[in-house]
Image (tube, coloured by chain):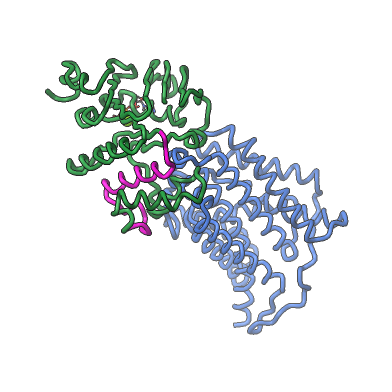
Amino acid sequence: MLSVEGLGSAYGRIEALHGVDVAVNEGEIVSLVGGNGAGKTTLLRAISGVQPVTRGKVLFEGADITRLGPHRRVECGIAQVPEGRQIFGSLTIEDNLRLGAYRRNRGATTAFLEHVYESFPVLRERRQSLAAGLSGGQQQMLAIGRALMSDPKLLLLDEPSMGLAPILVDKIFEAITRLRDAGTTVFLVEQNAFAALNIADRGYVIETGDITLSGPAGDLMRDERVREAYLGV
Amino acid sequence: MAEFLQFAFSGLTVGAVYALVALGFTIIYNASDVVNFAQGEFVMIGGMATVFLTALGVPIPLAVVLAILGAVVVGLLLHRLAIEPARGASSVTLIIITIGASIFLRGLAQVVFDKQFHTLQPFSGDTPIVVGGASILPQSFWVMGGAVVIVVLLWAFFNHTLIGKAVLATSANRLAAKLVGINTGMIMSLAFALSAAIGAVAGVLVTPITLTSYEVGTLLALKGFAAAMLGGMGHPLGAVVGGLVVGLLEAFGAGYLSSDYKDAIAFVVILITLFVLPTGLFGRASVERV
Ligand SMILES: Nc1ncnc2c1ncn2[C@@H]1O[C@H](COP(=O)(O)OP(=O)(O)OP(=O)(O)O)[C@@H](O)[C@H]1O
Ligand SMILES: [Mg+2]
């Protein structure tokens, strides 16, 4: 479904991705794990089209989308829950969600809104309050809900567990598994390697802009190098 | 009392124009972080183009529509040719670009139009209406009424349409706006077009009272900027309040002190705001963004 080939990206003259290859098949959860500054966010942004690409290609459902604007990629069915949630704090929760459906036809929005409220009832309760007033966990739910409003085929998640209490982390990962079961393909980026690989079908390890390991998630969790570097055992 | 009312009405009339210019600043600033000092030129284009089109025999309503469209085209070109290529430049660079653009537009206006002062027929005659001893030109009501209508329309646009909310979303978080599929480049064009249209309407409404010429934009931009700063750059309600306050200060200053100081008021407002209240009355944005 998604295929990233030899992707390079740079901030000014400093290259952050040195030719990355990643593939995500339909119906999978694929996790990308790596430490601080490894290039995870850069890769997700490049896939969404909000980060310049210096070389390589991004293919989605067989079509080359490397030169497509970010709004066109949302239309194609790629949605992202960005690092740090990035909600529209000065707008209401419901407006945040409606804007998530910006590229969809208006008729279906209400049904999707209903769907998101069912998954995250706390958002319904507070739908007319400003999003800035939500707690961290609620903001994360809002960010996920907003991405789902575009009815994506592929959902990109950038560290959804960051800064959340352990019980909330479990909830978020459960929600991600449910999404996959309902047919959404998921590409998950995490520093929390255990939780991310635990729910994944396959995984990749990224270090300073290069993919260093890849394979079935179970194999990666048993891999000595991964266990030492990321699982703390 | 009659004198006081007289000054108050004239203050509210010019204040309404400053408020519209300040709203133009606000809309562009919110969508693109650009402080657009060419905002006054839209007012000039609105007035001057209407004057020259009517002189060519175009009926007034059509001339007004064409003048507004002309300003919109100029606004779009300004964004496309001057701002867009400098994307990512510092705020100061962008401000200098807009100042350059305003000088260019004034030069162009001298050539396309001329260097004379012009006026338009007042929309509903020039028999003053007496209110509490103060006599008010009917055109003043057009200006104030027009400003009210524009403010209400803008409010509805930003609060009740998805595209209006997309503009707000773009100003709240550009990255997230792109990620939900908002074409932020298009939103910026829209902001420039909208600001240009509002400026042009202000120019048409006020020309019968204040006259117009190729260079009226300079002072209007300054005063609109003072109003926007006073209200808090980026805050729509602040822009309206700021505009009315600057207008009233000017009218009372000119009336009770001396009309020599009229144009200095805006400078004083900018300075006092910067020193005392850098985020403005309704402050949100920080000064260094300005
Ligand atoms: N805006 C930026 N300007 C310059 N360099 C940047 C910028 N953002 C990231 N980098 C650099 O690019 C590299 C990759 O950063 P990136 O944010 O993609 O890492 P990450 O894997 O997402 O890290 P984290 O887990 O901390 O979020 C890092 O070396 C970082 O310093
Ligand atoms: Mg990151």
Residue B93 located left or right of residue B258: left
Query: Percent position (x, y) of residue A115?
Result: 36, 49
| Residue beneath the point at 30% across and 48% down | A119
Query: Percent position (x, y) of residue A126?
Result: 32, 58
Q: Quadrant of the N terminus of chain B?
A: bottom right
Q: Residue furthest bottom?
A: B132
Could one spot residue B278 in this view of the protein? Answer: no
Number of residue marks: 0
Whether B231 is among the magenta residues is no
Q: Quick one: A2 or A206, which is closer to the camera?
A: A2
The quarter of the image that holds ligand 1 is top left
> Residue A228 appears in which quarter of the rendering?
top left
Q: Quick one: A51 or B87, which is closer to the camera?
A: A51
Query: Percent position (x, y) of residue B150?
Result: 61, 62
Residue A39 located left or right of residue B110: left
Residue A89 located left or right of residue B135: left
Residue B138 located left or right of residue A53: right
Q: Is residue B254 above or below residue B181?
A: below
Query: Percent position (x, y) of residue A52?
Result: 47, 26
- Chain drawn green, letter? A
Q: Quick one: A90 or B35, which is closer to the camera?
A: A90
Please provide the residue range marked out in magenta. Answer: A126-153
Q: Residue furthest right?
A: B57
- Chain drawn blue, letter? B
